[in-house]
Image (cartoon, rainbow, N blue to C red):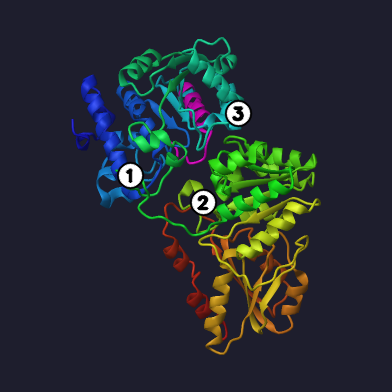
Amino acid sequence: MDIKEIHSPADIKGLSLNDLEDVARQFREALLFKLSHHGGHVGPNLGMVEATIAMHYVFNSPVDKIVYDVSHQSYVHKMLTGRVDGFIDPEKFDTISGYTNPNESSHDFFTIGHTSTSITLASGLARARDLRGDKENIIAVIGDGSLSGGQAFEGLDSAAVLGSNFIIVVNDNQMSIAENHGGIYENLQLLRDTDGQAPCNLFKAFGIDYMYVKEGNNIEALINAFKQVKDIDHPIVVHINTQKGKGYGPAEIDREKWHWEMPFDRLTGNPLQIDESEDYSSITGDYLIKAMGRDPLVVAITAGTPTVMGFDAERRRHAGRQFIDMGIAEQDAVSTASGLAKGGARPFFGVYSSFIQRAYDQLSQDVAINGNPAVFGIFAPGITGMNDVTHLGWFDIPLISNIPGIIYLTPTCKEEYLAMLDWAMNQHETPVAIRMPGGRVVSAPDRTFPDDYSSPRAEIVRQGSKVAIIGVGDFFPMALKAADILAESGINATVINPRYVSGLDKEVLENLKKDHTLVVTLESGILDGGYGQKIDGFYADYDSVKVLNYGVPKQFLDRYNVSEVLTELRLKPQLIADDIKNQFK
């Protein structure tokens, strides 16, 4: 059967085993075709081909409901549910997202991009089914290290007492993004080694029934297993042992690298474009490795994404026990950082802006209230960060800057970042977060930077009059360019680098009142609760000073074009300059 003829799961239900294996081959080829041209999650999807086919062969989607954790392992599910063109037609590559999306198909039940949520989401569907008196199967698929997240444990705990049909498919490929960490994976290893027969069984300890499938990439074995659990009257875990990257040699060998990849050459596995430019991940990794060499109490922490702060396999080996991977568990990482700081260590937790949202309570309760001097590096923030709706990085300024007791710094260039990082790692008074500039690394070797960031001290880079432009972090160069354009029209703008978004340099702002009537703020984040709103509030009682805030309205966007969004928000130097000139007409 040609996969172009598959429009719904019903189209594969009458196929023979040989035909299903041929469909699996075609799906794997379609995955590699799209991913090699477009990029995306390679390993997770190659490893789930057979399991996805088997689930849709046995169950009756969308009546039976399948919920994918993280859902970056749902590409074959999409092909089986009428979206195959998005994988085989280059003109339609961008018509589907990399995650499940109810707007695309009735077979998708949630938009999911963060991890460890499928069990609780699916258990909610199961409880709703029971309240309605219906009988459909509810299946939660979880894998890629997602079991380490606290919500997964909470989901297992509540699922155990559900008392009705609930099927949890644990896709065990022995990997998170990098290698797995944590005691739960020791038990999974034991279960694999004993073909699921070990008396020590995490899932049974919760009170959940259990089944093991040794050959998790064998369609026949999977179909037999799913047939056994279909219409079951109680919760059960189906533990499948799969190969991440199955069917593509480079992805089988280097499973960490091939978790997600940019476009690549199919024959060699080499990326089509090699970017050797410096980035803040490698800058951070180099700094921390050197700091570890000087001080055995310096610790780098990750929550399953070590390369976000430059800790590739080589740096991890070099760091030894001064590197801690908590698994996909941001809450645990933040609280551990607080505990390390309290114990006299110097922890740095590097995390994507999108993922720090998962640990707001720990930032507030365990870090800020206790005042422990942990350091947090916030990566991929703002408009230039990740652009999928589930991974937006523009909420961190309101989230972090409004927690009392945490200093949130916004460097504008490499040298300023290193100065801030060095101060943060060597002070013992307060928790500090540092927001990495987005885009390419900007270097300013001729600028000088202070050695103390304990209080808001804005930097006046250019002194002018009438209008002041405050450029936050990576939008500081935009402020300079807008000022250059204004200078051509005879408007000499003051340009300010605030350095600090968790407080205001009130002395600088007071002085602006003397000869400025317009203050403009530029920030790569949402305006509600953001830095610009703080400036607006400061001048609220002064009619002589008007404030213009540039940033992102409170909204979700999905797979947006950065340049188009910046233009729409008038966050381009020429557009900003035009708006300012219009204020003086």
- Rendered view: 451 above or below 348: below
Rendered image quadrant of residue 370: top right
Label 2, on which residue?
392
Mark 3, secondary structure of its residue: loop
Measured from the top left, where is residue 189 in percent x and y? 52, 20
121 part of magenta stretch: yes
Tag of residue 268: 1
311 relative position to 449: left or right: left
Q: Earlier in the sequence, mark 3 or mark 1?
A: 3
Q: Earlier in the sequence, mark 2 or mark 3?
A: 3
Can residue 572 be seen here? The reply is yes
457 relative position to 115: left or right: right
Tag of residue 182: 3
| Extreme-bottom residue of the structure | 490
Report, in whole angstroms, how far the alpha carbon at label 3 lies from the one at label 1.
34 Å
Q: Amino acid at mark 2?
A: Leu
Q: In terms of depth relative to the viewer, which is nearer, 356 or 282?
A: 282
Measured from the top left, where is residue 86 in percent x and y? 29, 45
Q: Residue at x 18, y 30 (%)?
A: 1
Tag of residue 215: none
Q: Which quadrant holds the C terminus?
A: bottom right
Can residue 582 be seen here? The reply is no
378 part of magenta stretch: no
| Residue interval drawn in magenta | 109-130
Rendered image quadrant of residue 508: bottom right
The mark lying in front, picked from 2 and 3, is: 3
Measured from the top left, where is residue 428 in percent x and y? 80, 50
Kindly check if marks 1 and 2 are in contact, taking CB atoms under 8 A apart as contact: no
